[in-house]
């Protein structure tokens, strides 16, 4: 069955790129709503932007969606990752600004809040987007991504950064075996100190700080508390990928293999998949699908009913 959250959740914070304070309220939503953003500062129908690949615009540093009257919502990926990772199909996300708050740079607070209110089933069957044949996208810098058939959501990704503090890291995820909420959800976004100035000059990263990102300076991690887990950077990339893959509009049955993943690459491969109608099918079959094995452990029993 399709799911939604049991009660509204309000969170406030700063937009990492705009630097503006923003309040976000997640509302339970009916079946077949999908993840629908509502910019209440815009108002009326012009404020609604559906989280779908058809609305995703080309961006490098974060995932941005835009409706047909030009209303944008930026930085949706960590929220989308929490919904995809926890198996939540329908939510209306009210925002009073253009950017989802960065919080601590991970999905941890969102997952905790959702686990507190609980998840409930609607009375409509859940649909999945199942990949039938591999689809590959390559970028100029050697980055590539392939979506291929698999019975569950799976990832196989690697990164390679010049900063020796990050270097090469690889990570695999299978939603049958790995709980999204245990580790990936807590992995924070990261950047290099040398890139911070360039980002600020471009008018971005105004809300960025050591409170919401890992910052590396030539091999040294500047955050006092250190990492939350081994290979936190590539695990954050996994989080980003799980969020971006939810732009297909429903849970994905398939494997993403990616070298040097990023938001541009993952939105392009999702668009390439959806552009080829023979490459996927919509199905309600879910025998092998268990996207959130940790859910029953972390939710109160009543919340799983
Ligand atoms: Zn991210």
Image: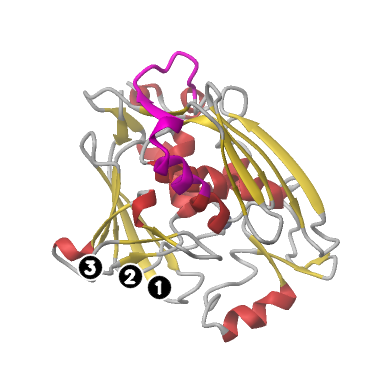
Instruction: Please report whichever mark, 1 or 3, sits nearer to the chain's N-terminal start.
Output: 1
Number of the front mark, 1 or 2: 2
Q: Is residue 286 magenta?
A: yes
Instruction: Please report whichever mark, 2 or 3, sits nearer to the chain's N-terminal start.
Output: 3
Instruction: Using the numbered discs, state the Cα–Cα distance from disc 2 to disc 3 in whole angstroms.
Output: 16 Å
Picture quarter with ligand 1 = bottom right
Instruction: Using the numbered discs, state the Cα–Cα distance from disc 1 to disc 3 in whole angstroms.
Output: 24 Å
Query: For the residue labelled by badge 2, is the local secondary structure a helix, a strand or a loop?
Result: loop
Q: Residue at x 50, y 62 (%)?
A: 102
Q: Are marks 1 and 2 in contact (CB under 8 Å)?
A: yes
- The response on whether ligand 1 sits within 8 Å of label 2 is no
- Residue 21, numbered circle: 1
Q: Quadrant of residue 22?
A: bottom left
Asked if residue 230 can be seen in this view, the reply is: no
Whole-percent x, y for residue 7 in the image: 27, 41
Residue at mark 3: 69
Tell me which segment is drawn in magenta. Answer: 269-290
> With respect to residue 232, does 104 lie above or below?
below
Asked if residue 220 can be seen in this view, the reply is: yes
Residue at mark 2: 97
Instruction: Using the numbered discs, state the Cα–Cα distance from disc 1 to disc 2 in whole angstroms.
Output: 8 Å
Nearer to us in this view, 153 or 283: 283
In the image as oriented, which residue stretches furthest toward the left? 44
Crowding near the residue tagged with mark 3, few <14, some 14–19, many ≥20 C-alpha atoms within 10 Å = few
Q: Is residue 10 magenta?
A: no
Query: For the residue labelled by badge 1, is the local secondary structure a helix, a strand or a loop?
Result: strand
Number of the front mark, 2 or 3: 3
């Amino acid at each position: 069955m399709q799911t939604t959250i049991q009660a509204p959740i309000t969170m406030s914070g700063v937009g990492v790129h705009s630097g503006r304070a923003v309040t976000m309220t997640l509302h339970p939503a009916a079946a077949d709503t999908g993840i629908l953003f509502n910019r209440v500062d815009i108002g009326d129908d012009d404020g609604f932007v559906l989280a779908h690949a058809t609305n995703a615009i080309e961006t490098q540093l974060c995932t941005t969606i835009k409706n047909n009257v030009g209303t944008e919502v930026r930085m949706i990926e960590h929220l989308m990752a929490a919904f995809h990772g926890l198996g939540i199909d329908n939510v209306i996300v009210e925002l009073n600004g253009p950017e989802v708050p960065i919080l601590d740079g991970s999905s941890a607070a969102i997952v905790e809040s959702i686990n507190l209110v609980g998840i409930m089933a609607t009375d409509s069957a859940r649909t999945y987007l199942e990949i039938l044949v591999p689809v590959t996208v390559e970028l100029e810098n050697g980055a590539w991504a392939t979506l291929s058939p698999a019975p569950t959501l799976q990832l196989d990704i690697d990164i390679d950064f010049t900063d020796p503090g990050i270097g090469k890291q690889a990570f695999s995820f299978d939603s049958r075996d790995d709980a999204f909420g245990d580790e990936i959800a807590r992995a924070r976004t990261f950047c290099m100190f040398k890139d911070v100035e360039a980002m600020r000059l471009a008018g971005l990263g105004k809300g960025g700080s050591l409170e919401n990102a890992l910052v590396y300076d030539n091999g040294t991690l500047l955050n006092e508390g250190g990492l939350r887990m081994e290979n936190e950077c590539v695990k954050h990339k996994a989080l980003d990928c799980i969020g971006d893959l939810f732009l297909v509009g429903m849970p994905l049955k398939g494997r993403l293999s990616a070298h040097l993943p990023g938001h541009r690459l993952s939105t392009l491969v999702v668009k390439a998949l959806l552009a080829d109608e023979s490459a996927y099918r919509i199905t309600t079959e879910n025998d092998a699908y268990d996207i959130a094995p940790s859910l029953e452990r972390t939710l109160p029993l009543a919340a799983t009913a």
